[in-house]
Image (cartoon, helix red, strand yellow):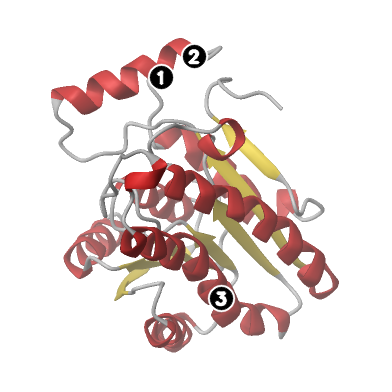
Amino acid sequence: MTGRLAGKVAIVTGGGHGIGKAYALGLAGEGAKVVVAEIDAIAAGTVAADLKSRGFEAIAVRTDVADPASVAAMVERTLVSFGRIDILVNNAAIFATVPMSRSPFDEIEIEEWDRMMAVNLRGMWLASRAAVPHMRARGYGKIINISSGTALKGSASRIHYVTSKAGVLGFTRTLARELGQHGICVNCVAPGSTLSEENPDESIVKMRSAAAGERALQRVQKPEDIVGAIVFFASPESDFITGQTLVVDGGACMH
């Protein structure tokens, strides 16, 4: 532990499963106090308990990022427990843990399209809107949005997901323009296909393994592969970087 985030408070939405869980552990390992904000309350509690068993400070807060009242309660719990907000990782999304259909664009139900946008895009906006006043008051903050490599290259049979993740790119750049004057950095990480599923079956492993063939670094991507980028954007080392998207996919998509 190098302590690059000592004394900082980080919220990780969708922090109870998969990649989000890895982000929470990585931030805690650098000294941050972590809020595991997750719609699955049991999973959030399990991750927070694991962090505390390792000697870190953490709390679990059941959060539906698509619900403004739930997001406001998340921020309030954070302030009551830790007194400040330094880092917001907007990770919560419909994809694996909260599943989506993989269908042609004209077979996706309208309700599913709307729910995808409500969580993956509106949820990011709501969480940022709730956290930013507390960052702005202190003249410092780090917001890290999670997009996807699919937003840069497209991916058939999941147009609602890819569209939502493409929206994250524009959201990041625009928010960075608005918040720079307040000392708040807004950046984006776009992971590649990652073996983040818990207890994946053979078909999932096969799908994730097939993605390795598209990469310069030809192996399966794991959640731990993305943590360094998150910590970098959360740390003082990136204080003069904002509005940027970093693709972490082993060299599948180079831009």
> Which residue is labeled 3 in the image?
85
The residue beneath circle 2 is 214
| Residue 48 visible somewhere in the drawing | yes
Q: Earlier in the sequence, mark 1 or mark 3?
A: 3
Around disc 2, counting alpha carbons within 10 Å, would you say few (fewer than 14), some (14 to 19), or many (20 or more)?
A: some
What is the distance, in whole Å, between disc 3 and disc 2 at their CAs? Answer: 38 Å
Q: Are marks 1 and 2 in contact (CB under 8 Å)?
A: yes
Q: Nearer the viewer, mark 1 or mark 3?
A: 1
96 left or right of 233? Answer: left
Residue appearing at x 17%, y 66% in the figure: 42
Q: Secondary structure at mark 2?
A: helix
At x 34%, y 48%, the residue is 95
Question: Label 3 sits on what residue type?
Answer: Ile
Q: Where residue 247 sits: x, y (%)?
A: 61, 34
For residue 211, the mark is 1
Q: Which of the two marks, 3 or 2, is nearer to us in this view?
A: 2
Helix, strand or loop for disc 1? helix
Q: Residue at x 76, y 54 (%)?
A: 242
Q: Quadrant of the C terminus?
A: top right
How crowded pointer 3 is (Cα within 10 Å; few <14, some 14-19, many 20+) is rated as many
Q: Residue at x 32, y 64 (%)?
A: 111
- Where is residue 7, by image quadrant? bottom right
Closer to the camera, 56 or 197?
Answer: 197
Does the CB distance between marks 3 and 2 fall below 8 Å? Answer: no
Residue 176 percent across, percent down from the top left: 75, 62
Q: Where in the figure is residue 83, as x and y percent of width and height?
A: 51, 84
Residue 235 showing in the rendered view: no
Q: Which mark is residue 5?
A: none
